[in-house]
């Protein structure tokens, strides 16, 4: 349809055409959204499958002043340990005994 044809149509016909277009557009949007959801689910499944599981690491070091503060020895040193090390103590001073 060209613009001339639309100018010649009565209002009722134009309104009916608009309603029909709204229905077609809504159906296409829903179909597109479903396709995107399928693709996203496929990508998410791929990422989860390739994710490597790490075992839980038990803490090896403990703050004697606050026993709830622990460190496994991985990652950055906690502030409480850095402060103690700069004061001249050794990392081994904070090791959790295996008997505990």
Image (cartoon, rainbow, N blue to C red):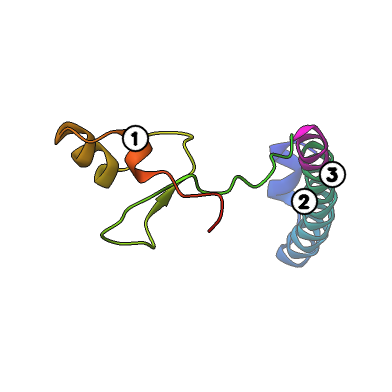
Q: What secondary structure is marked by label 3?
A: helix
Residue wearing tag 2: 29
Spot occupied by residue 47 in the image (x, y as percentages of width and height): 76, 35
Residue 91 x, y percent position in the rendering: 34, 35
Image mark for residue 35: 3
Query: Label 3 to label 1, Cα distance in Å?
Result: 55 Å
Quadrant housing residue 86: top left
- Gap between marks 2 and 3, in whole Å? 10 Å
The magenta stretch spans residue 39? no
Circle 2 — which element? helix
Say which residue appears at 45% left-offset and 33% top-offset.
Answer: 75
- Residue 49 located within the stretch drawn in magenta: yes
Circle 3 or circle 1, nearest the eye: 1
Is label 3 in contact with label 1 (beta carbons under 8 Å)?
A: no
Q: Is residue 72 left or right of residue 42?
A: left
| Residue at the spot of label 1 | 91
Query: Residue at coordinates 71% horizontally, 64% vertically from top-left?
Result: 11
- How crowded is the residue under tag 2: few (<14 C-alpha within 10 Å), some, or many (20+)? few
Question: Can you see residue 77?
Answer: no
- Span shown in magenta: 44-51
Give the percent coordinates (x, y) of residue 9.
76, 54
Q: Nearer the viewer, residue 4 or 75?
A: 75
Image mark count: 3
Describe the element under mark 1 as helix, strand or loop. helix
Pointer 2 or 1: first along the chain: 2
């Amino acid at each position: 349809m060209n613009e001339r044809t639309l100018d010649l149509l009565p209002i009722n016909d134009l309104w009916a055409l608009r309603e029909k277009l709204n229905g077609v557009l809504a159906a296409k949007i829903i179909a597109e959204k479903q396709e995107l959801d399928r693709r996203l689910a496929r990508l998410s499944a791929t990422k989860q499958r390739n994710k490597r599981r790490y075992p839980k690491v038990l803490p090896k070091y403990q703050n004697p002043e606050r026993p709830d503060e622990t460190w496994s020895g991985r990652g950055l040193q906690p502030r409480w340990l850095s402060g103690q090390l700069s004061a001249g103590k050794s990392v081994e001073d904070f090791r959790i005994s295996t008997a505990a």
